[in-house]
Image: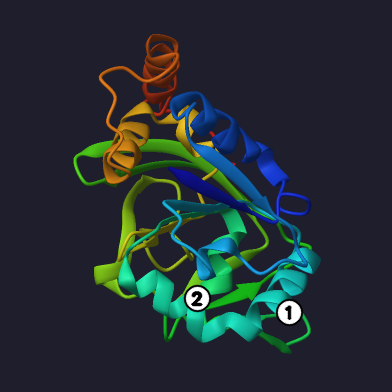
C-alpha cells in the first residue's frame, strides 16, 4: 500500500499532521511518500491507495493552486475514477472549487473539481466553532478554524450534517464533500485521532480493516468525554 502526503512542507496547520502520524501507526507496512511543492503529484503518475493533504495558509493556498493548475484535468479525472482515496482537511477543501474570492474581491482560480463550488475569504475575521456532525451512522466531533466559507456544494456530495456548530457556510448545516472516494472537510481535531469510528471507516475503504486500531481504548475514552461535553447547556462553540 502506498500513501501520498501532498506538500507537507507548507501544509502543516492546526495539528493536522497528526492524521498522518496516526495513519502510520495504523498502517506500519504501508509506504508513505511526501510530495514536495515543486514535484508532480505521484497519484498522477502511478497507482496510489490514498492521498492526504491538510491545512495551509491562504498564501500557501495560492502557491499550491499555481503548481496544480497545469494538472487540472488530470486531477479531476483521478478523483472521478475512484482508484485512490483522497482525504483533504481544513482549507485544502477550498482548492476543489471554481475559485476562491479574496478579501479585495479578486479571485484565484480553483481546480474546478466540484463545478459551482466557491469559497469566500473574510480575513482578518477568523471563524472558529466546535463541531458535532453525523456522517453515515456515526457521530463526528472536532472543530473548525478558518478565514473562508465555502458555497455551492451539491446536497448529494455532502460529507456530513452538522448538529452543533456550523456547516461549510453560515447558510447551511451541510459540511464538506464526499463523492467518488474524495472526502474533504473543514473539520480539524485532528480528525482521525478524535474519531475512532471514522478511522475504521477509512481503513475499510483502503481494504485494510482492523479489529482494533492503535490506542483505541484511550481514543474512545477521550471521545466519550468530549461527546458528553457537547450536551452541556453552557457549551461555548467558539
Give residue 119's position: percent from left, percent from top: 57, 75
Toward the front, the furthest residue is 46
Out of 152 and 28, give the one closest to the viewer: 28
Q: Residue at point 42% right, 35% down?
A: 141
Write down the quadrant of residue 62 in the picture: bottom right
Left of 140 or right of it: where is 52? right
Q: Residue at point 34% right, 62% down?
A: 83
Q: Residue at point 25% right, 19% down?
A: 211
Out of 157 and 141, give the one closest to the viewer: 157
Density class for disc 1 (Cα within 10 Å; few <14, some 14-19, many ≥20) is few
Identify the image quadrant of the N terminus.
Answer: top left
Element on which disc 2 rests:
helix
**Which of label 1 and label 2 is nearer to you?**
2
Element on which disc 1 rests:
helix
Give residue 142's position: percent from left, percent from top: 49, 37
Mark 1, residue position: 66
User: In 3D space, how far apart are the residues under numbered discs 1 and 2 (Cα atoms)?
Assistant: 14 Å
Give residue 90's position: percent from left, percent from top: 58, 53
Out of 3 and 10, give the one closest to the viewer: 3
Report if residue 235 is visible in the image: no
Density class for disc 2 (Cα within 10 Å; few <14, some 14-19, many ≥20) is some
Identify whether 235 is placed above or below 204. Answer: above
Picture disc at residue 75: 2
Out of 129 and 221, give the one closest to the viewer: 221
Identify whether 21 is placed above or below 148. Answer: above
Amino acid at each position: 500500500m502506498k500513501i501520498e502526503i501532498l506538500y507537507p512542507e507548507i501544509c502543516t496547520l492546526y495539528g493536522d499532521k497528526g492524521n498522518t502520524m496516526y495513519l502510520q501507526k495504523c498502517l506500519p507496512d504501508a509506504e508513505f511518500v511526501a510530495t514536495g511543492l515543486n514535484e508532480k503529484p505521484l497519484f498522477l503518475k502511478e497507482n496510489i491507495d490514498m492521498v492526504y493533504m491538510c491545512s495551509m495558509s491562504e498564501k500557501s493556498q495560492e502557491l499550491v493552486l499555481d503548481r496544480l493548475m497545469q494538472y487540472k484535468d488530470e486531477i479531476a479525472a483521478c478523483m472521478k475514477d475512484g482508484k485512490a482515496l483522497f482525504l483533504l482537511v481544513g482549507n485544502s477543501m477550498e482548492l476543489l472549487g471554481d475559485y476562491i474570492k479574496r478579501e479585495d474581491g479578486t479571485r484565484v482560480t480553483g481546480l474546478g473539481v466540484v463545478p459551482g463550488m466557491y469559497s469566500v475569504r473574510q480575513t482578518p475575521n477568523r471563524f472558529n466553532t466546535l463541531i458535532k456532525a453525523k456522517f453515515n451512522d456515526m457521530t463526528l466531533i472536532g472543530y473548525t478554524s478558518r478565514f473562508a466559507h465555502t458555497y455551492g456544494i451539491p446536497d448529494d456530495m455532502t460529507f456530513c450534517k452538522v448538529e452543533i456548530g456550523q456547516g461549510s457556510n453560515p447558510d447551511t448545516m451541510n459540511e464538506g464533500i464526499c463523492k467518488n472516494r474524495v472526502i474533504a472537510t473543514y473539520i480539524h481535531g485532528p480528525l482521525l485521532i478524535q474519531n475512532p469510528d471514522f478511522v475504521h471507516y477509512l481503513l475499510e475503504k483502503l481494504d485494510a480493516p482492523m479489529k482494533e486500531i492503535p490506542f483505541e481504548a484511550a481514543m474512545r475514552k477521550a471521545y466519550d468525554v468530549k461527546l458528553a461535553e457537547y450536551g452541556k447547556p453552557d457549551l461555548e462553540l467558539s
